[in-house]
Image (spheres, grey):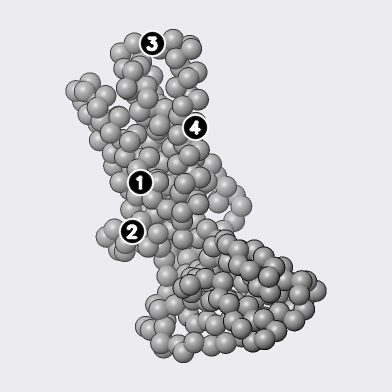
C-alpha cells in the first residue's frame, strides 16, 4: 500500500461526496414514504398536489390542495390497508382557498389507502391519482436518537465509499477508513437503528429472521461485508478486493428505497 498524493486525496473525497449525495437523493426520492406529487387541470386551471405517504400517529394527517375556485369541491375515499374494511367517503373541507383532506390517524405502523377526487361545478369528478395512495403512520422518535442515527448512516456511507476508492488506488489509509465506516454503521445502523424502529413502529428488529424489512436487512448485509473485509485484511493482508466489494455493496443496498417492505399492521388479524 502507498500514501496517496494530496491532490488525489482531495479529488477522491470530492468524488465520494458526490456519489454519496446522489445515492441519498435517489433513495429518498424513490422511497415509499416520499410524497406523491403531480398536477391536474380542473375547470381549466392547474392544481398542484402533494399527497402524503408518511405521517405522525399523534394526529390525523392533513392533505391540503390550493383550489381558489369556490365552486370546485372534492372528496376522499379511504380504508385501512390490509383490512376487510369497505371503502368510505369523506368530503374535503374548504378553508379559504384550500381544500383539506383529513386522513384518520392510525396506530404506529398502521396504513391507510386513500384516493382524492376533485369535483367540478357540473359534477364531473377527477381523481388526482390513478390508484389509491398508501400512507403509513409512525410514532414519535426523539430528536437525540433520530438525528445521530441519520448523521451516522450518512457518514458511514461517505466513509465507506471513500474507503472503496482508497482501496482501488491501493492507498495506505484503507483499513483505517474501513474501521471508521464499520464503527459508524454499528452504532448508527445496528444500535440506534433498532431504537428508531422501536419508537416509530413498536418493534426493535423486523428484518431476517423475524421479518422481511429491507431497511433492517440491508443494514445487516452492509455490516457483514465490512466485517468480512476487515477479517480478510487483518488475517491475511488480502482484503483490498473485499474492501472494494464492501463499498460497492453498501452503495447498492443503500440505493434500495428506505422503508421498502417496512413495518405494517395487518388489520385482518385484529378484526
Q: CA distance from mark 2 to mark 3?
A: 40 Å
Q: Check disc 1: other Cα within 10 Å, few if <14, some if 14-19, many if 20+.
A: some
The answer to whether marks 1 and 3 mark residues whose Cβ atoms lie closer than 8 Å is no
Quick check: 223 above or below 90? above
Task: Decide if residue 48 is in sight here.
Answer: yes
Work out how far the residue at label 4 is from the one at label 2, CA to CA, in angstroms. 30 Å
- Locate residue 270 relative to residue 135 in the image: left or right: left
The disc placed on residue 253 is 1
Whether residues under marks 3 and 4 lie with C-beta atoms below 8 angstroms apart, the answer is no
Estimate the x, y position of residue 14 in percent, counting from the top left: 50, 25
> Residue at coordinates 57% horizontally, 66% vertically from top-left?
52
Above/below status of 9 relative to 36: above
In three-dimensional space, the C-alpha distance between marks 1 and 3, rounded to whole angstroms, equals: 30 Å
Q: Which residue is mark 3?
A: 3
Q: Which residue is mark 2?
A: 207
Front tag of 3 and 4: 4
Position of 211 with respect to 119 (left or right) is left
User: Which sits earlier in the primary sequence, circle 4 or circle 2?
Assistant: 4
Mark 2 neighbour density, 10 Å: few (under 14) some (14–19) many (20 or more): some
Mark seen at residue 18 = 4
Decide: is 208 above or below 110.
Answer: above
Q: Quadrant of residue 206?
A: bottom left
Helix, strand, or loop for circle 4?
A: helix
Amino acid at each position: 500500500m502507498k500514501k496517496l498524493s494530496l491532490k488525489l486525496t482531495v479529488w477522491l473525497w470530492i468524488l465520494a461526496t458526490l456519489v454519496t449525495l446522489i445515492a441519498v437523493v435517489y433513495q429518498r426520492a424513490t422511497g415509499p414514504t416520499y410524497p406523491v406529487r403531480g398536477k391536474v387541470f380542473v375547470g381549466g386551471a392547474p392544481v398542484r398536489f402533494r399527497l402524503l405517504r408518511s405521517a405522525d400517529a399523534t394526529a390525523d394527517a392533513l392533505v391540503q390542495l390550493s383550489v381558489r375556485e369556490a365552486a370546485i369541491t372534492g372528496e376522499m375515499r379511504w380504508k385501512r390497508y390490509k383490512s376487510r374494511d369497505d371503502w368510505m367517503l369523506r368530503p374535503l373541507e374548504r378553508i379559504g382557498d384550500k381544500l383539506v383532506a383529513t386522513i384518520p390517524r392510525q396506530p404506529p405502523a398502521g396504513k391507510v389507502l386513500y384516493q382524492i377526487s376533485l369535483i367540478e361545478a357540473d359534477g364531473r369528478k377527477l381523481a388526482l391519482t390513478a390508484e389509491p395512495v398508501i400512507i403509513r403512520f409512525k410514532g414519535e422518535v426523539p430528536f437525540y436518537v433520530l438525528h445521530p442515527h441519520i448523521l451516522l448512516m450518512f457518514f458511514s456511507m461517505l466513509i465507506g465509499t471513500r474507503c472503496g476508492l482508497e482501496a482501488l488506488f491501493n492507498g495506505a489509509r484503507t483499513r483505517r477508513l474501513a474501521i471508521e465506516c464499520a464503527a459508524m454503521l454499528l452504532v448508527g445502523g445496528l444500535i440506534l437503528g433498532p431504537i428508531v424502529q422501536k419508537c416509530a413502529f413498536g418493534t426493535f428488529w423486523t428484518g431476517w429472521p423475524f421479518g422481511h424489512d429491507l431497511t433492517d436487512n440491508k443494514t445487516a448485509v452492509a455490516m457483514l461485508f465490512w466485517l468480512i473485509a476487515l477479517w480478510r485484511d487483518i488475517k491475511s493482508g488480502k482484503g483490498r478486493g473485499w474492501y472494494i466489494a464492501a463499498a460497492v455493496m453498501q452503495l447498492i443496498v443503500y440505493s434500495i428505497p428506505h422503508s421498502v417492505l417496512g413495518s405494517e399492521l395487518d388489520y385482518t388479524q385484529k378484526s
